[in-house]
Amino acid sequence: CFLHCGDCRYDRSEIRLTKAVRLPPSHVLDTVYLDTTYCNPRYCFMPQRQAISAVCDRVRAALKEEERQNSSVSSLASFFGGGAGRGRSGGKTLFVFGTYTIGKERVFLSVARSCFPPGEKIYVSSRKLRILRCYDDLSLEDLARFTTDRKEARIHVTEMGKLDPKSLRATLEAAGLVRCVAFRPTGWAGRITEKSHGDVRVVGVPYSEHSSFAELRDLVQDARSLSAGRPCKFVPTVGGSGIRDHLQTLLARAPPGTP
């Protein structure tokens, strides 16, 4: 039998190949087509749930700072008779999340569910909305959050290529809000980074739909345990000329046997 992993994020706390795959009697796993996007020992980033938790923590911190600033502006306005103190330092924060055609949905949905009240709207393009409606793991409550009206939401979903300060400032002005915190979720980030550009802040988060090198090692080891002691072939599906060498390094670090 063969297994094609596709875009695979292998987390043993959520799935175990040895339990998820049920082979017919007399069959063994002999070939695995492996997602080798990050098949390099230098790619060692945090699990998805940890990356999502880090994003949620930053959103909550931004909301608390927003509340503090708005309270200060309100106090100044009251002190000066309602005129002074009103300006761009008060108001709401726009939260922007970069995505691809498919992927990264867990990030902005987790933020909406855990950091905002029920019914908080999420702006997506008409094209993205059509794609999201094809998902079979979104609840009716999740689907009801989506809107194609920019001004109806303070959570916006956009393309990865539109997370530059100029594009984000245009998005901020179109939404009618006063400050922006944008998140770029990608395994290429390696670690959490943060850059401020006036009223726009961009946070890079090591979140990926692809397995890190350590997770690939776990997957290879679990796959080998399904081969009944016979050699199991691993075929890379992503990578350049050096991927074969990195794959050999991976296989050497994932000894056969039930983990």
Image (spheres, rainbow, N blue to C red):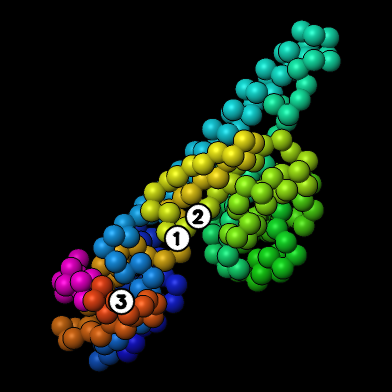
Q: Is 254 left, or right, of 98 in this rendering? A: left
* Residues drawn in magenta: 248-259
Q: Residue at x 74, y 38 (%)?
A: 177
The location of residue 92, given as percent across then percent down, is: 70, 34
**Residue tagged by mark 1?**
208
| 256 magenta-colored | yes
Specify the amino acid type for callout 1.
Ser
Residue 188, located in which quarter of the rendered image? Answer: bottom left
The location of residue 63, given as percent across then percent down, is: 61, 33
The answer to whether mark 2 and mark 1 are in CB contact below 8 A is yes
Q: Residue at x 32, y 60 (%)?
A: 43
Specify the amino acid type for callout 3.
Ile
Q: Is residue 64 above or below residue 156?
A: above
Q: Residue at x 46, y 50 (%)?
A: 205
**Residue tagged by mark 2?**
185
Q: Is residue 255 above or below residue 121?
A: below
